[in-house]
Image (cartoon, rainbow, N blue to C red):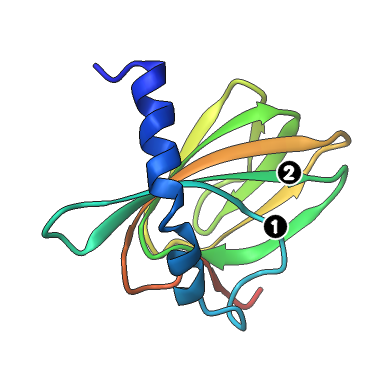
Amino acid sequence: MLNRRGFVSGALGAAVGLALFQGNADAQDAPKYPLRFLAKTEYPGDKYACILVSEDLSPGQRVARHMHSGVESSYIATGSITLSIQGEPDLVVKAGDGYQIPPLTPHSVQNGPEKSTIVATFIVEKDKPLVQSVPE
């Protein structure tokens, strides 16, 4: 099992490649909200990467409808959000809760009345943008 020191060391080592990854994202397609890239690990001999990000949302902030090329697995560290996933009823997610979104599934987020922090891990194809806008 990976301990905290091993994880932090791996995260710091992976951070070196983040600038290259960010250059692959299509800025024109990406919704306008700040993601802090924390770590990226590429699968050897594979076409996938695991990307760890954090995002802070202001009270009442809305994240426009978008999708990702791979699986999103997220955890709400602080605050609460309302998650709207295409084809499913809205879901209120509070601090300490997690959720997952399948690849290429349109979704949006409405933040609650206080600042929220989302920590997300994505398993995505290396040559695809992390975030793609989807019309409302």
Rounded to the nearest angstrom, the CA distance separating label 2 from label 1 is: 8 Å
Amino acid bearing label 2: Asp
The structure residue drawn at horizontal position 75% and vertical position 29%, both measured from the top left corner, is 79
* Labels 2 and 1: the sequence-earlier one: 1
> Judging from the image, what secondary structure is the residue with disc 1 in?
loop
Number of residues whose C-alpha sits closer than 10 Å to that of mark 1, classed few (under 14), some (14–19) or many (20 or more): few
Q: Are marks 2 and 1 in contact (CB under 8 Å)?
A: yes
Above or below, 80 relative to 127: above
Q: Residue at x 57, y 74 (%)?
A: 134
Q: Quadrant of residue 73?
A: top left
Q: What residue is disc 2 on? A: 56
Residue drawn at (53%, 79%), measured in percent from left and top?
Answer: 26
37 or 32, nearer to the observer: 37
Mark 2 neighbour class, 10 Å CA radius: few under 14, some 14 to 19, many 20 or more: some
Q: Of 53 and 131, which appears nearest the observer?
A: 53
Q: Which residue is mark 1?
A: 34
Looking at the image, residue 72 sits to the left or right of residue 41; the answer is right
Name the quadrant of the C terminus: bottom right
Left-right relation of 70 to 99:
left
Instruction: Look at label 1 and name its amino acid.
Output: Pro
Rendered location of residue 95, percent (x, y): 67, 24
Q: Quadrant of the N terminus?
A: top left
**Where residue 121 appears, x then y in whole percent?**
44, 43
Residue 83 at x, y percent in the picture? 63, 46
Q: Element at badge 2?
A: strand
Q: Is residue 113 left or right of residue 110?
A: right
Residue drawn at the location 39% of the way across and 47% of the way down? 14
Between 71 and 39, the one nearer to me in the picture = 39
